[in-house]
């Protein structure tokens, strides 16, 4: 794997520098397959409702808007994002705080901001991407080496602020996603293993404190995860029914649109957070494996882009995005099969929901952007930020590019 | 960090994420391949059923802890729409067994809407024999569900029926927006009385049972249960003995009695006759019984104590006297002459008798109309209305019951607005003696008397005294704040109290004197267009240090002193334990 990751050209190897690398076709293929699966499964899980095309149509609308913005993202050099990191970070905090003040409460949590005719918007989804970008920039500004756990504290503060705001919504799941992004980027950014371990241990030790900060329903969900029969109609019910749905799919599944558990509304939230239970039931073990393989391929391509990124900023953004997707998939699928608690994290690209879908699309666009502009020469990570290692002049292009 | 380390770390990240995916794959293998058959069976038969276990409703008790309600387990027959494989046949057979019409059952199923996994209750409190008959044919009746549910019982029947209220199935409108509070369709909720006002405390929280059931829908194995949480008890200020005395004293006459503690507004007894039997409603009242209750001319569902607006007659003289005293138009010993009539321009108003020379105090005691007609003009219609409102007339008292009537206190503006007629001098005279357009409920009058008795505080009447947990712990004491404080001069209060005491010692109500208890009060005989006058008596005792206000109203019988005063006397005797011995009520 290591060899594959390292890319075709080892650092320093002579290869013709090209400004625009190739668009990663495998990543695009994976994304298209996942989004397509999502659309089909959203239709499958809602086609027996009074308005069968409602959810599908809305999701396609989200997809169209998301793709439009993603196209714009591709056109701009991703390094422009690094320059506006501070503004992004501040704006992000403002929006998250605004959710707490004016946000719409749904299912006991304040996560939404109404945007008039555009429907509602869940800023905490977008915020994940903003955190990835701004944290990557932060790493570039503080290049290390990180010799103690205290050297990591600025980064912890960087993530903790939005994390607390999101936790207050309350959105435990998304707050945990931040944790995963943080750890992934810290590791790739060069933190020492023992410092990472210390942070993780400290985080786990904070668990009992967090327990008190949780809302009643969140505690019930966690307890129900440990002991489903405590809350048979509520969260425990969802876990049991979701397991029955997935399990009953057996090896080949009941067939597309032929699921019974989800259609009969045994499984709650079956088109959003629990969409994998529809996939498990209708497409079986085989379908589940194909889906996981698609995600794994996606993750692999993402990490490969990180390996060949032209600068540390791009590389770390790629790692952050991959950590986010990987964690999402594990927690979401784990929840539907009863090995993770219910935390309301959607399945990337697949679950119904505009904010999440768009965020994932833009994350993909960002990865493609990084891949497009990669230098096959690789990068020296020791180079301090702000000092151009070399100035490349594009043939015919006026502006020098720093790396 | 060099690039090589970075790439190594990327490899580790890939391995970690890949490892997590392998965990997922293993888990999927376990439940889909290894245990797949088991889950498939569960899903195909869909043998998991969740049923709700209704919580026992909290008891309602009187002030000394004597329960006024019980909960009795009884059978409820329901249909589970999702398992109704042969609806036409099952509905016909169940209709026959339960004594309902098939269309009634269909209507209930339709009303339940789109919740195929929630049982639809057909009938509560089904007799054992019918249950046995259903059980015998269980195999042919898929989708029929028999549950044991507590049924509300009111051991005293019609006693305090208007206070307690009754239960009924929640309707669509009431369900709107209350689902989040745990209300579900088919729930019985309080529809009237304190059952309604305090429903959210009494109802408790339903439990749940998740069970695996067989093809006939019989539970095989309980997978999980959440026991129901019983509702909290409601302790009322009502004293069962006093309530009983009030209803006995009222007897078969149409009217109402209110007994209230003037110090804090706690209602000790609240009776209205005729009443209804809340047991009729406890299991969902049949449409026939309901129409009967609605059509009876005497309107048993009407709570006359709080919903009946009556002309008050001479009881209103308390307002007129207060206004005259506060405006310093009279004193206790102001002298009047009553020739038996009063002339206003060319109209002559006749009193019952000629009282001759008398003081203002005697005017109250003997309820001389001429005295109050004389005062009517100088006081004026506006002041009469103002003081009536200060006493809380013309507005709801805020008692913890629903649909209270505000009554009517007329003034020139009101008459012009409502009747589109000008105000005449005679209207002022009529108002001054509680006739004409004046309407008040017995509980409003009780609050007015309480204000005289307690020195001008407009208490908020309330039936409930405390909410008590099933374990007996007092969760909440109910003591609503006073609605206002009248700023009366001490002289005014003392003349009023002296006058009301004189009513019993030497005035119109000497017949109700109780040895050992000084009673003060005012009679009222309210002329009305529907026949004989309404009889009123509003009094309090002990006159020196009032602890109980009692108001009695009897419709269309005659003099207040003859018909209402004895009821008040009887209630006071019971409340102060003065029937046989002489022991005072605590």
Image (cartoon, rainbow, N blue to C red):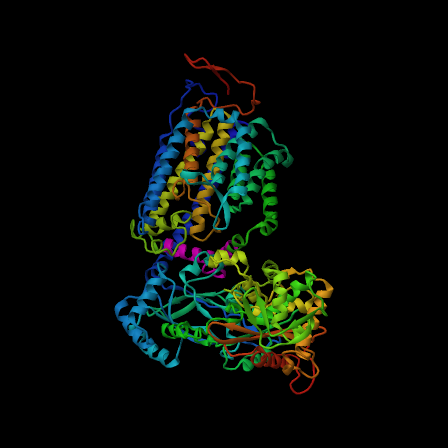
Where's residue B253, x and y in %?
A: 50, 80
Work out whether B535 lies above or below A349: below
- Report the magenta residues as a range: A221-247
Q: Quadrant of the N terminus of chain B?
A: top right
Q: Quadrant of residue A357?
A: top left
Is residue B436 at all visible to an observer of this figure? yes
Nearer the observer, B534 or A377: B534
Residue occupying image coordinates x 73% and y 65%: B491
Q: Quadrant of residue B478?
A: bottom right
> In the figure, is residue B181 to the left or right of A286?
right
Count of labels in the image = 0
Is residue B457 at all visible to an observer of this figure? no
Nearer the observer, B316 or B256: B316
Q: Is residue B317 magenta?
A: no
Nearer the observer, B545 or B476: B545
Work out whether A204 lies above or below B354: above
Residue at the far front in the pictured view: B346
Where's residue B425, x and y in %?
A: 56, 62
> In the figure, is residue A31 to the left or right of B7?
left
Please identify the dominant SS of the magenta region.
helix
Nearer the observer, B458 or B185: B458
Work out whether A301 lies above or below B530: above
> In the figure, is residue B12 to the left or right of A152?
left
Where's residue B180, x and y in %?
A: 47, 57
Q: Is residue A227 magenta?
A: yes
């Amino acid at each position: 794997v290591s060899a594959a990751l390292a890319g075709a050209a080892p650092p320093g190897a002579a290869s013709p520098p090209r400004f625009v690398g190739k668009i990663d076709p495998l990543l695009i293929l994976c994304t298209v397959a996942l989004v397509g699966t999502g659309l089909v499964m959203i239709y499958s899980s809602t086609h027996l409702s009074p308005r069968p095309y409602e959810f599908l149509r809305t999701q396609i609308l989200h997809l169209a808007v998301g793709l439009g913005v993603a196209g714009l993202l591709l056109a701009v050099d991703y390094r422009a994002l690094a320059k506006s990191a501070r503004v992004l970070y501040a704006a992000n905090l403002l929006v998250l705080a605004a959710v707490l003040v004016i946000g719409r409460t749904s299912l006991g949590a304040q996560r939404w901001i109404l945007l008039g005719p555009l429907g509602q918007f869940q800023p905490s989804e977008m915020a994940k991407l903003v955190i990835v970008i701004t944290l990557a920039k932060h790493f570039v500004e503080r290049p290390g080496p990180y010799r103690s756990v205290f050297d990591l504290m600025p980064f912890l503060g960087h993530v903790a602020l939005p994390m607390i705001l999101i936790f207050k919504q309350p959105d435990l799941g998304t707050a945990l996603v931040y944790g995963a992004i943080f750890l992934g980027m810290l590791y790739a950014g060069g933190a020492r293993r023992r410092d990472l371990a210390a942070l993780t241990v400290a985080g786990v030790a904070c668990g009992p404190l967090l327990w008190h900060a949780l809302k009643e329903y969140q505690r019930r969900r966690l307890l129900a995860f440990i002991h489903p029969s405590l809350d048979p109609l509520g969260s425990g019910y969802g876990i049991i029914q979701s397991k029955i749905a997935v399990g009953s799919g057996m090896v080949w599944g009941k067939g597309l649109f032929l699921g019974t558990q989800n259609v009969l509304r045994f499984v709650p939230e079956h088109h959003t957070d629990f969409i994998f239970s529809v996939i498990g039931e209708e497409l079986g073990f085989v379908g589940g494996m194909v889906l996981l393989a698609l995600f794994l391929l996606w993750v692999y391509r993402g990490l490969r882009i990180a390996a060949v990124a032209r600068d540390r900023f791009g590389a770390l953004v790629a790692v952050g995005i991959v950590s986010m997707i990987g964690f999402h998939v594990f927690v979401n699928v784990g929840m539907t099969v009863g090995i993770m608690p219910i935390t309301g994290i959607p399945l990337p690209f697949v679950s119904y929901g505009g904010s999440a879908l768009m965020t994932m699309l833009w994350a993909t666009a960002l990865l493609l952007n990084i891949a497009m502009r990669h230098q096959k020469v690789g990068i020296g990570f020791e180079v301090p930020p702000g000092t151009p290692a070399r100035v490349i002049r594009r043939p015919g292009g006026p502006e020098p590019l720093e790396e | 960090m060099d690039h090589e380390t970075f790439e190594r770390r990327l490899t580790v990240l890939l391995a970690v994420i890949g490892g997590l995916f392998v965990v997922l794959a293993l888990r999927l293998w376990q439940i889909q391949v290894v245990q797949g058959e088991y889950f498939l069976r569960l899903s195909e038969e869909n043998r998991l059923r969740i049923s709700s276990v209704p919580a026992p409703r909290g008891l309602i008790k009187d002030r000394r802890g004597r329960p006024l309600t019980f909960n009795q387990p009884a059978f409820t027959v329901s249909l589970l729409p999702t398992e109704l494989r042969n609806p036409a046949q099952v509905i016909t057979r169940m209709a026959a067994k339960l004594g309902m019409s098939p269309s009634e059952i269909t209507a209930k199923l339709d009303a339940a809407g789109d919740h195929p996994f929630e049982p639809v209750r057909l009938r509560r409190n089904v007799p054992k024999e019918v249950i046995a008959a259903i059980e015998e044919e269980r195999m042919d009746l898929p989708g029929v569900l028999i549950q044991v549910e507590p049924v509300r019982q009111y051991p005293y029947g019609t006693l305090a029926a208007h206070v307690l209220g009754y239960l009924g199935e929640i309707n669509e409108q009431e369900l709107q927006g209350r689902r989040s509070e745990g209300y579900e369709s088919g729930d019985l909720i309080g529809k009237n009385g304190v059952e309604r006002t305090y429903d959210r405390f009494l109802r408790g929280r339903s439990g749940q049972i998740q069970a695996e059931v067989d093809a006939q829908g019989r539970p095989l194995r309980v997978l999980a249960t959440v026991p129901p949480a019983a509702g909290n008890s409601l302790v009322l200020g009502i004293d069962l003995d006093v309530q009983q005395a009030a209803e006995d004293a009222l007897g078969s006459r149409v009217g109402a009695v209110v007994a209230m503690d003037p110090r804090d507004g706690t209602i000790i007894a609240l009776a209205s006759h005729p009443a209804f039997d809340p047991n009729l409603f406890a299991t969902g009242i049949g449409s026939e019984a309901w129409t009967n209750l609605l059509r009876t001319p005497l309107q048993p569902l009407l709570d006359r104590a709080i919903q009946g607006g009556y002309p008050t007659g001479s009881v209103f003289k308390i307002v007129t006297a207060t206004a005259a005293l506060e405006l310093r138009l009279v004193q206790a010993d102001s002298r009047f002459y009553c020739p038996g009539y009063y002339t206003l321009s060319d109209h002559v108003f006749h009193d019952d008798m000629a009282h001759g020379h008398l003081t203002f105090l005697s005017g109250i005691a003997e309820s001389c109309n001429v005295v109050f007609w004389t005062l009517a003009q100088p006081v004026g219609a506006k002041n009469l209305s103002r003081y009536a409102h200060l006493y809380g007339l013309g507005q709801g008292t805020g008692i913890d019951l629903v649909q209270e009537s505000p009554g009517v206190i007329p003034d020139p503006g009101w008459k012009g607005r409502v009747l589109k007629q000008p105000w005449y001098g005679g209207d002022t005279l009529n108002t001054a003696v509680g006739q004409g357009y004046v309407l008040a409920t017995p509980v409003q009058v009780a609050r007015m008397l309480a204000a005289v008795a307690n020195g001008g505080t407009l208490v908020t009447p309330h039936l409930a005294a405390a909410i008590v947990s099933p374990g007996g712990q007092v969760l909440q004491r109910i003591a609503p704040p006073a609605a206002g404080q009248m700023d009366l001069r001490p002289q005014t209060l003392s003349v009023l109290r002296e006058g009301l005491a004189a009513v019993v010692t030497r005035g119109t109500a000497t017949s109700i004197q109780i040895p050992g208890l000084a009673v003060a009060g005012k009679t009222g005989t309210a002329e009305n267009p529907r026949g004989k006058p309404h009889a009123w008596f509003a009094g309090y005792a002990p006159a020196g240090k009032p602890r109980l206000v009692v108001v009695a109203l009897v419709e269309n019988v005659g003099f207040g002193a003859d018909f209402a005063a004895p009821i008040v006397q009887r209630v006071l005797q019971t409340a102060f334990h003065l029937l046989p011995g002489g022991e005072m009520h605590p």
